[in-house]
Image (tube, coloured by chain):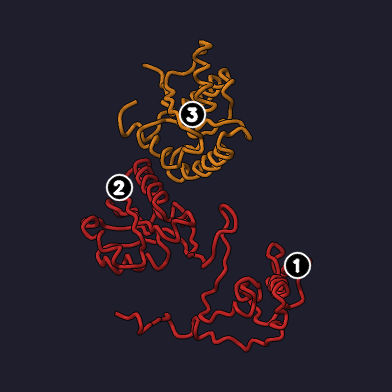
Amino acid sequence: MKEFEPIIVAFCCHYCAYAAADLAGSLRLEYPPGIRIVEVPCSGRVEEELILKAFAEGADGVLVAGCLEGDCHFQKGNIRARKRVEHLRQLLKEIGLEPERLAMYHLSSAMGRRFAEIAWEMAEKVAGLGPSPLRRRTREG
Amino acid sequence: MIVAKPKPFPFLTEQLRPYRKVAVVGCETCVAVCLAGGEREVRRLAQALELERRVRGGVELLTLPLTVKRQCEYEYLEPLRETLKGVEAAVSLGCGVGVQYLAAAFPELWVVPGLDTLMAGGPTALGVWEEYCRLCGECLLHLTGGICPLTRCAKGLLNGPCGGASEGRCEVNPEVPCAWILIYERLRRFGKEELLRHLTPPKNWQLAQGRGPRKLVREEVRG
């Protein structure tokens, strides 16, 4: 049987994580194939509803990747995103999903290696949790 | 504005357990500004309620996210009539007034409050709201330099200060500045300290809460 390969939606800030993912590619670093990158102008753009929608559509995990603290192009977007993610993890628990399925990371555009690490870290964590119950109900993973 | 805060999510899921088709009705006025019941909060809650039902199992839940200009006026609720056909229950993300208007406008609809309505106040910082008005029905702000002692003095003193303040802070709650010191400073800036000698007689609380729900009729604008 094929091993479970989690689908993880990664909301990546244009100024850091998205470029870092690009760099990871240029460096020929391998990262899990289940990562689905969505470029956003700032991690602060990622509203709670957007994250919930990713889960509703069957994502096994969601990661939000924004700039390092103090480096946000829009001053505080990454800090807002982090607070929102923390708050939403509590809601996920109340919905009946493991809060570990959602995580926030901070990195810079030069951190291609770190991006690959984060992707692996998240994929392993979510693989341990198994497929999202929402995915099982929507389409067999 | 009316300041409200969201009720706990598990309370709502429990209340809505028996229903399949649920409207989530927000209000674009006060509760939208205090980030509790505007369009964004409506969409988020509707999405979360559907997810919860899918994860926990049971009958599938269909939500209708709707937002009206003002939930406290029937003319804004009336256009929902067609949309709400066949909807069994609604969560109102309006204030306590909105919830009641929604329930009264749609007698067939079971309405659940999605917020706890707290106070008449305003934001003092991002994510912080404070009470400014007790809705007492007889404004005294002309005597107190625009600072309400009924609301902002912990003891609600009409004739203050009590003398218990320490370093400008209230003895009841040191987080709160002494309203009477604020009043004194403001009156002094305007050279109106004399106003402090004005003795305010006991308030007529019938204007606030003495005879059941208050009613205002203004003949000059009455239809």
Residue A55: give x, y in percent of width and height.
Answer: 40, 35
**How far is disc 3 from disc 2 in space, using C-alphas?**
31 Å
> Observer-nearest residue: A79 or B104?
A79
Relative to B85, does residue B218 appear above or below in the rendering?
Answer: below
Q: Are marks 2 and 1 in contact (CB under 8 Å)?
A: no
The residue tagged 3 is A12
Q: Which chain is red?
A: B
Callout 2: chain: B
Q: Do pointers 3 and 2 mark residues of a single chain?
A: no
Label annotation for residue B61: 2
B14 sits left or right of A101 in the view: left
- Frontmost of labels 3 and 2 is 3
- Residue in the picture at 47% in, 62% down: B116
Residue at disc 1, secondary structure? loop
Amino acid at dot 2: Leu
Q: Label 1 neighbourhood size at 10 Å, few (<14), some (14-19), many (20+)? A: some
Tell me the amino acid under the disc marked 3: Cys
Q: Nearer the viewer, mark 2 or mark 1?
A: 1
**Pointer 2 local density, CA inside 10 Å: few below 14, some 14–19, many at least 20:** many
Which residue sits at x=49%, y=14%?
A25
- Position of residue B138 measured from the top left corner of the image (x, y, whole percent): 53, 82
The colour applied to the residues of chain A in this rendering is orange
Residue shown at 49% from the left, 31% from the top: A63
- Secondary structure at numbered mark 2: loop
Same chain under badges 2 and 1? The reply is yes
Side of B202 relative to B166 (left or right): left
Residue type (three-letter) at the residue carrying disc 1: Gly
Q: Is residue B1 above or below residue B61?
A: below
At mark 3, the secondary structure is: strand
* Circle number at residue B168: 1
- Say whether marks 3 and 1 touch (CB < 8 Å): no
Please tell me how crowded label 3 is: few (under 14), some (14-19), or many (20+) other residues with Cα within 10 Å: many
